[in-house]
């Protein structure tokens, strides 16, 4: 977040871990549980029940695909990538003729390389030092390539092998665009951000197919398995502050997760409709792209910033009529009730107790090569402030007589935290108002926190998070986009 009057920015460092801009060069109707248009089911992931017990990862005992791959060493990374491409062929062989009346031609050139080794020339460029996976089409090229030396092992270590499958599904999405052309709203002048949003959406299409147990080589459950795929989008997001209209922009994690969810919940025709007008109307990078907001770095959590946070929350919810709780540095304890360290709402005392030292750990940006939120790795300052805000919103829920200890409380909490987040957007960045404001990258930190196993932003008063990461992000986005009204109306 940004304290405008001292130009302090509380946001994730511009590049988290290794920022990998995937895609550098360049369905069936699934039965589900019907619900109201405004409803978000805490146990739902795109119309499917959340299941943490199902298998996730490569299937055991299945023969490897027999595809020609340049440079392959037969390593586990290459086997994983090759099997992913083979299953993607199966998927798009079915989808393009059925939905677009087009035959899907397979990729002419598959390339495995080691970014630490000798470079391979693809699209006229060397892969030496290029930690990436990408599709390149046009001018006689039709290739998908991946870095088996650094990228694929890093993804597997942080998010599991299915993250590699997801990244290659994104790249295959670019190949689909290239083949469909105008049928996928593509032309020579189509901005990069539209191409990337569509590719994330096509990735969602394929991962739904995997979840539905139709993939030969892979399985994915709708609990932690799907949450890890969503977390991968945080890892490969744009650096904070990159305008969505910039050539090469891929989108912030907040936007990329939305596109993926659209694909997961709909067939590929939905993805093909994503165009410039839609992207310009909803993308968040344009809101955060002002030069004044490009400052990076984290501010300390101290008495000054905590006071500004208190003022911001009091102002955001002043019309609710609730007795507004006081943020208290008491190591996150209540005289009665359960502690949900590092921030706890104590209804009897009407305080939000916080553990400053633990919040400072969360506020640190993740170190290079580490997954946000893991032992010794932070997420970013906004994640810490949003955890405090989430506990504050429980007082608002108490005022309207809502239950505080069930899954709907977790959804309301995420929604109200999203509404507060939108309240902090600076409407006039040229005027100093001595308030706390949303800064570039903050929404991505919220996404990263929401996908943690112990997320407080989407948890009830006892710290029990909503099981579905899919639903957590969706509820937060609803509050951010639509304000606080839906938070009480939709989650009862």
Image (cartoon, rainbow, N blue to C red):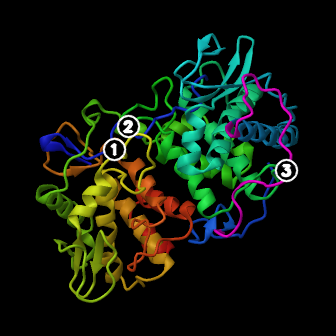
Name which residue lies at 61% across and 41% down.
200
Report if the CB atoms under discs 3 and 1 are less than 8 Å apart.
no
Name which residue lies at 49% across and 76% down.
408
Q: Is label 2 or label 3 in front?
A: 3
Check disc 2 and report the residue beneath it: 240
Q: Earlier in the sequence, mark 2 or mark 3?
A: 3
Percent across and percent down for residue 84 are: 75, 41
Q: Is label 2 or label 1 in front?
A: 1
| Real-space Cα separation, disc 3 to disc 1, in angstroms | 41 Å
Which element type, helix, strand or loop, lies under badge 2? loop
Percent across and percent down for residue 456 are: 39, 67
Q: Main secondary structure of the magenta part?
A: loop
The mark found on residue 62 in the picture is 3
Mark 3 Cα-neighbour bin, 10 Å: few <14, some 14–19, many ≥20: few
Report if the CB atoms under discs 2 and 1 are less than 8 Å apart.
yes
Report if the CB atoms under discs 2 and 3 are less than 8 Å apart.
no
Q: Is label 3 or label 1 in front?
A: 3
Percent across and percent down for residue 124 are: 63, 10
Q: Earlier in the sequence, mark 3 or mark 1?
A: 1
The mark total stands at 3
Q: Which residues are magenta?
A: 50-77
| Real-space Cα separation, disc 2 to disc 3, in angstroms | 41 Å
Left or right position of 170 against 428: right
Left or right position of 489 against 89: left
Check disc 1 and report the residue beneath it: 12
């Amino acid at each position: 977040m940004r304290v405008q009057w001292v130009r302090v920015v509380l946001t994730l460092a511009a590049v988290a871990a290794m920022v990998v801009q995937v895609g550098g060069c360049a369905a069936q109707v699934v039965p589900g549980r019907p619900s109201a248009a405004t409803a978000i089911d805490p146990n739902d992931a795109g119309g499917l029940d959340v299941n943490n017990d199902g298998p996730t990862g490569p299937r055991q005992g299945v023969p490897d695909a027999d595809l020609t791959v340049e440079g392959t060493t037969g390593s586990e990374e290459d086997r994983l990538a090759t099997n992913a491409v083979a299953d993607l062929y199966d998927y798009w062989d079915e989808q393009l003729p059925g939905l677009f009346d087009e035959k899907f031609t397979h990729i002419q050139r598959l390339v495995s390389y080691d970014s630490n080794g000798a470079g391979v020339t693809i699209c006229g460029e060397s892969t030496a030092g290029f930690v990436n996976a990408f599709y390149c089409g046009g001018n006689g090229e039709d290739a998908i390539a991946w870095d088996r030396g650094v990228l694929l092992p890093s993804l597997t270590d942080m998010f599991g092998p299915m993250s590699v499958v997801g990244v290659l599904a994104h790249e295959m999405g670019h190949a689909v665009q290239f083949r469909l052309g105008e049928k996928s709203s593509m032309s020579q002048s189509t901005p990069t951000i539209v191409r990337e949003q569509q590719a994330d959406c096509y990735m969602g299409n394929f991962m739904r197919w995997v979840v539905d147990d139709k993939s030969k080589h892979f399985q994915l459950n709708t609990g932690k398995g799907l949450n890890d795929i969503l977390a991968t989008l945080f890892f490969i997001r744009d650096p904070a502050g990159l305008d969505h209209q910039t050539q090469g922009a891929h989108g912030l994690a907040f936007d990329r997760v939305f596109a993926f969810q659209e694909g997961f919940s709909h067939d590929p025709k939905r993805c093909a409709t994503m165009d410039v007008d839609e992207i310009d109307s909803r993308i968040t990078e344009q809101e955060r792209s002002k030069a004044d907001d490009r400052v990076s770095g984290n501010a300390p959590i101290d008495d000054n910033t905590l006071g500004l946070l208190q003022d911001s929350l009091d102002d955001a919810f002043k019309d609710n009529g609730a007795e507004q709780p006081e943020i208290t540095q008491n190591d996150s304890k209540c005289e009665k009730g359960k502690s949900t360290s590092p921030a706890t709402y104590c209804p009897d005392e009407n305080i939000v107790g916080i553990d400053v030292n633990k919040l400072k750990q969360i506020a640190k940006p993740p170190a290079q090569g580490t997954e946000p939120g893991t032992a010794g790795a932070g997420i970013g300052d906004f994640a810490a402030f949003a955890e405090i805000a989430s506990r504050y919103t429980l007082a608002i829920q108490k005022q309207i007589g809502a239950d505080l200890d069930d899954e709907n409380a977790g959804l309301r909490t995420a929604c109200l935290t999203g509404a507060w987040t939108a309240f902090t957007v600076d409407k006039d960045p040229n005027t100093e108002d001595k308030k706390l404001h949303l800064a570039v990258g903050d929404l991505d930190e919220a996404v990263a926190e929401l996908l943690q196993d112990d997320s407080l932003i989407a948890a009830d008063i006892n710290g029990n998070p909503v099981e579905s990461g899919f639903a957590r992000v969706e509820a937060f986005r609803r509050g951010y986009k639509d304000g606080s009204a839906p938070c009480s109306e939709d989650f009862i």
